[in-house]
Image (tube, rainbow, N blue to C red):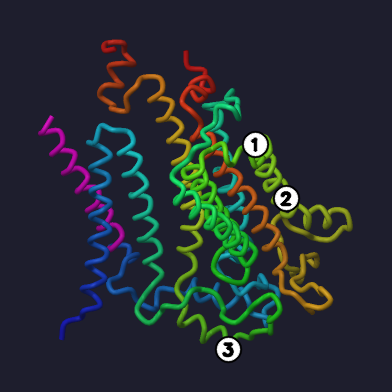
Amino acid sequence: MKNKEILLGVLAGLIVLALVYLLVSLAIIIVPPQEDNRWLASWFLETTYNSERKELWSASPEVVTSILWDYRGLDTVYETSVFFFAIIGGLMLVRSVKIDPSKLGIRGMSVISKTVTKIVLVSIPVVAVSVALHGHLTPGGGFQGGSIFAVASLLAIVALGVGFLYRRGWSKVRLLGFRTMGLIIISIVIMAVFITGLTIGATGYIMQNQWKPWAPIGYGYLINLGLLGNVLYSGSLIFLNIAEFLAVSAGLSLAFIIMALPREELIKGGDLE
Amino acid sequence: MIDFSAIIWGYIYMVTIGIIAMTIYGMATRPNIVKKLILLSILSDTGNLIAVMLGVHSGVIKPPVFPGISFTNHEEVGSDVLKEFSKSAVDPIPQVLVVTAIVIGLAVLVFLGYVSLLLYQKYGTLDVRLLEKKIKGEAK
């Protein structure tokens, strides 16, 4: 047993040495990092909000969100579906679980923890929604906002008990509905330009955001809201961020709620014995 | 003259790569599934850290967001201003890869959490050596 562990340790070291050799020999890691190996970064940084090159821009000063939902958007859609199926796979393992409100934990932790949690529970979702809505203007977006929101529900489960969330109407069906709604909004937004192009006989692409010289349909980037004047919404980015926020927050919250159910319910749900 | 920047960067890379080595070793040798999951999440986070570090170099510290733009303040920006801005902003591409990797890593972790939860409910242990025997029916 001891020899085997030593062998495995040596093997892990060898794998890592090979990894380091590859990274250094292919000049991916340069110590210290140099300025001249970032031409791709410069291209994105100079194009995403460049009003002199409107055939290439995405009308958003946030370069990460622009790449995520515009330049490399289809990849993100596939990664969203990976997320979707991972959660679905987890729920399938406990597929027949029934949430019985009378059996859920309602005691939670001490009064101090409960009070502090109730104060924090107001602010975390506000921050999450703000991060998601400002995804095309400041660092953040749907993924980040959804993850922050999931932290709030995890905190509520731990400090206040699962019953707290369930009595506020966070049922399995409703959370699944929110998540599916997010995915439906994403698919509508990415197909809208393509279908409009088909119906009026112009070129339009799946995942297209702004107009191109050869594909004149786009979401635009300014909307006039009366008192506020022109508001920057960066085309499809804000819709995709909101939809992703719905999908990620509802999916992760549901996963945490099911995981926190009492033991007997989980055994029944998993069809064990 | 000693180049301190190279020493510090080399130290950071050595530490992260050492963490990767330790997590791979731990996943191979620790028998408890929960410990394997913890090591797996540390491994993926260290990989993400290396990816983000590839985009940073000395003098480049700003986030890859053009400053001063909000919902109502959206003046048009030309090539010259953006060229200046791109010299001081970090590389956005590794960050893009990491954003999705984190959420998907979390979802996969939740899935593996469900699997280990059900394994514990059925067999009463998360020790892989005991699990092997129990699944074969050799131990109770």
Label 3: state its secondary structure.
helix
Label 1: state its secondary structure.
loop
Residue drawn at 32 percent across, 66 percent down: A29
- In the picture, the disc for residue A259 is none
Looking at the image, can residue A56 be seen? Answer: no
Name of the residue lying farthest toward the bottom: B80
* Left-right relation of B135 to A49: left
Q: CA distance from mark 3 to mark 2?
A: 37 Å
Q: Earlier in the sequence, mark 1 or mark 2?
A: 1
Instruction: Name the residue tied to disc 3.
Output: B80
- Label 2: chain letter: A
> What span is colored magenta in the figure?
A1-24
- Labels 3, 1: front one: 1
- Dominant secondary-structure state across the stretch colored magenta: helix
- In the picture, the disc for residue A185 is 2
Residue drawn at 36 percent across, 19 percent down: B123
Residue A167, picture quadrant: top right
Q: Is residue B14 above or below residue A170?
A: below
Where residue A149 sits: x, y (%)? Answer: 56, 53
Q: Are marks 3 and 2 on the same chain?
A: no
